[in-house]
Image (cartoon, rainbow, N blue to C red):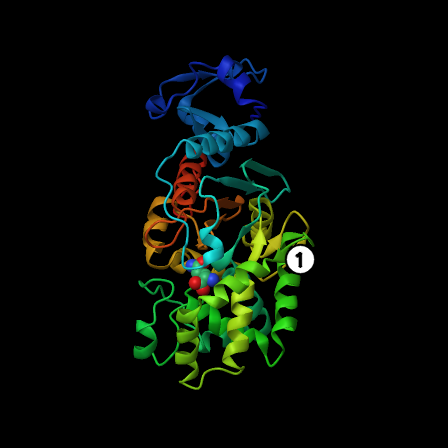
Amino acid sequence: MVLLIDSILTAQKNCKDVVSVSEVNDPRRLIGLDSLGIGHSQYCFVNVFINAVKSSAVIFNKYYFVLTGTQIMQDILDNIAATMSARTDRGEVASYIPQLACVDPNQFGITVALPDGRIFSAGCANELFSIQSISKVFTLTLALGKLGDAVWKRVGREPSGDPFNSIVQLEHESGKPRNPFINAGAITIVDTIMMGHQPKETLAEILQFVRFIANDDSIGIDENVARSELSTGDRNASLAHFMASFGHFQNPVDQVLGTYFHHCSISMSCQQLAKAGLFLVSDGTNASTGERVVSEQRARRINSLMLMCGHYDGSGEFAFRVGLPGKSGVGGGILAIAPSKASIAVWSPGLDKIGNSKLGTEALEMLAKQTGWSVFGQ
Ligand code: GLN
């Protein structure tokens, strides 16, 4: 049975009494498919209907709808953006990087990119923002491509349970960071990528890779943000020098740091970021361009790291609330991956106490709930 609904408005008009959530568990209830507005005059039991559409159904306003309708996804995003614009408690913008402290917190954008190439957006989805730590997903991918599993000799694969810029574990664990997504881990990853090259060359390579996976050559670095972070980057400098004291670094510390600050300062919009995440949706291939980026196994492993470590000491909470691999940045962006389904980018500059986007997380929680997307079940 194939059910297509073009417009949620038509659907709502035509099927006022179709399936309400309170009734979905009652298998005796009959649904008139005719009332879905699809031209069939058949009836079926609710449980048959649910089974037929389970993988592609979405709950919206108490009704089950089939997710193939373009308008349905757009309505979900518009609804999320409207809900977020009404929020007054929006968190605090990152103030330790002066340039980020100037960003207007009253902004919100969201994009859902599907493997078939369709893009749905709401709010300021074309506005550029500083992707900050989301860039760590891309540099990790690059490092794995260059060094393969040798990367894991220098960084671990365990959640840290500590803030993103914490130094405490490094002493106990002889300068080996817990994972590639905390600052110490990402700085180490930059050192592995540099391989004796100059910062400029390394940055060009990182940028080229991000442009390739996003299929967008306009992506660039915001020099003002990079300079701003460099001027207040004492904590990251401490992490880098501390790790170097264990004899782990292969490149001059100041060059590694400069490269790290610059790749954190890549500017992207939600649309560009969601497109860049598509290779993690379809087992390593960007299905919309047909380009293979990494192997199937590697894509799954990057997703697992995003789930376990992508939100620092808030990773458990994010997995609990959203149920998808995700990577946040202090610029207020989050990239989330619904494997086989969609790449999602959301941006709202206000952060929670841990440093993850407050409304971004709420928006993803709403989206996951309404689409049923989760790595923990259908
Ligand atoms: N560039 C930021 C830093 O090093 C990245 C932190 C983040 O986004 N969580 O502090």
At horizontal 63% and vertical 78% (from top left) the residue drawn is: 197
- In the figure, residue 40 lies in which quadrant? top right
Circle count: 1
For label 1, being within 8 Å of ligand 1 is answered: no
Q: 318 or 203: which is nearer to us?
A: 203
For label 1, the residue is: 212
- The reply to whether residue 265 is visible in this rendering is no
Q: 319 or 328: which is nearer to us?
A: 328
At horizontal 57% and vertical 48% (from top left) the residue drawn is: 128
Q: Position of residue 353 (x, y in %)?
A: 32, 52
- Quarter holding the N terminus is top right
At horizontal 63% and vertical 62% (from top left) the residue drawn is: 207
Q: Position of residue 121 (x, y in %)?
A: 56, 37
From what the image shows, is residue 343 above or below residue 26? below
- The reply to whether residue 311 is visible in this rendering is yes
From what the image shows, is residue 170 above or below residue 372? below
Which residue ends up furthest to the bottom in the rendered image?
Answer: 247
Q: Position of residue 220 (x, y in %)?
A: 63, 57
Q: Secondary structure at mark 1?
A: helix
- Quarter holding the C terminus is top left
From what the image shows, is residue 208 above or below residue 184? above
Q: Amino acid at mark 1?
A: Phe
Q: Position of residue 147 (x, y in %)?
A: 56, 75
Q: Quadrant of ligand 1?
A: bottom left
* Crowd band around label 1 with a 10 angstrom C-alpha radius: few (<14), some (14–19), many (20+): some
